[in-house]
Image (cartoon, rainbow, N blue to C red):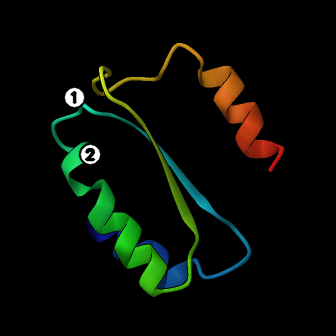
Amino acid sequence: MDYTKKLIENGKGDFKIYMIIGGKDRYFFKNANSVKEMLAENNIPCAIKIYPDMGHTFPDDFDEVLLDILNE
């Protein structure tokens, strides 16, 4: 979570965090909501997309998801 604290300290600005997480990702999945709450408390927008059957990798439709994020 140190990276989140550094982001909060140094990165307040006009941006949004978008997390793409696998439900079987042993590290990031369990911390995702805590990170989102920390960001929200500091007025940094954050969205999470969870792929229930995915581990620590990129989803098959990553290109499409990334384009959707960039077009928001």
Q: Residue at x 30, y 20 (%)?
A: 53
Above-or-below relation of 6 to 17: below
Quote the CA–CA distance across marks 2 and 1: 9 Å
Across and down, in percent, residue 39 comes to 45, 75
Residue 52, position as x, y percentages in the image: 32, 28
Residue drawn at (23%, 56%), measured in percent from left and top?
31
Quarter-of-image position of residue 25 = top left
Graded by Cα atoms within 10 Å as few (under 14), some (14 to 19) or many (20 or more), the crowding at tag 2 reads some
Residue at horizontal 74 percent and vertical 75 percent from the top: 14
Instruction: Point out which mark residue 24 bears.
Output: 1
Q: Secondary structure at mark 2?
A: helix
What's the amino acid at mark 2? Phe
Position in image of residue 18 (x %, y %): 55, 51
State left or right for residue 71 relative to residue 32.
right
Which residue has dot 2 on it? 28
Q: Is residue 66 left or right of residue 61?
A: right
Element type where label 1 sits in the image: loop
| Quarter of image, res 1 | bottom left
- Left or right? Give the position of 30 relative to 69: left
Q: Is residue 27 above or below residue 55?
A: below
Q: Are marks 2 and 1 in contact (CB under 8 Å)?
A: no
- Residue 34: image location, x then y, percent: 27, 67
Q: Residue furthest front?
A: 52
Residue at point 78%, 44% (across, down): 70
